[in-house]
Amino acid sequence: MEELIELLEEIKEDVDFENEDSLVDDGLIDSFDILQIISALNDAYDISIPASEIIPANFNSARTLYEMVKRLQDD
């Protein structure tokens, strides 16, 4: 989880990824940020995020992102 938060902070350093749970809903990250996050996750975790997973619920917090990464790694 720490590695994921560091990765997210590199993309958007002014957001408190450890405590926020409404990143998309509150407009703290936008579609461009989400594209950067997807690319970084694909590279860092050797996964491929399908379009069906690109929904606000999966990007609202570091925890939900982490859960998505783990789920995709298990597939």
Image (tube, helix red, strand yellow):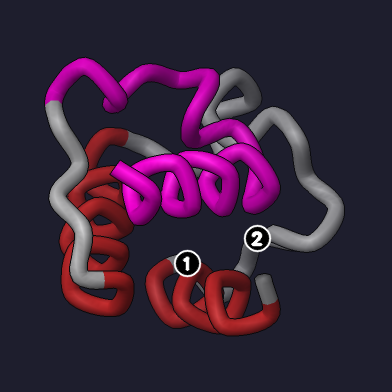
- Residue 70: x percent and y percent? 49, 52
The structure residue drawn at horizontal position 49% and vertical position 68%, both measured from the top left corner, is 8
Query: How many angstroms separate mark 1 from mark 2 (CA)?
Result: 6 Å
**Which residue is most to the right?**
19
Tell me the magenta residue range.
51-75
Q: Which residue is mark 2?
A: 15
Residues at circles 1 and 2 in contact by the CB criterion of under 8 Å = yes
- Residue 7: x percent and y percent? 46, 78
Q: Which residue is mark 1?
A: 12
- Residue 11: x percent and y percent? 39, 71
Q: Amino acid at mark 2?
A: Val
Q: Is residue 17 magenta?
A: no
As helix, strand or loop, the secondary structure at mark 2 comes to loop
Pointer 1: residues within 10 angstroms few (<14), some, or many (20+)? Answer: some
In the rendered image, the quadrant that contains the C terminus is: top left
**Which residue is most to the front?**
75
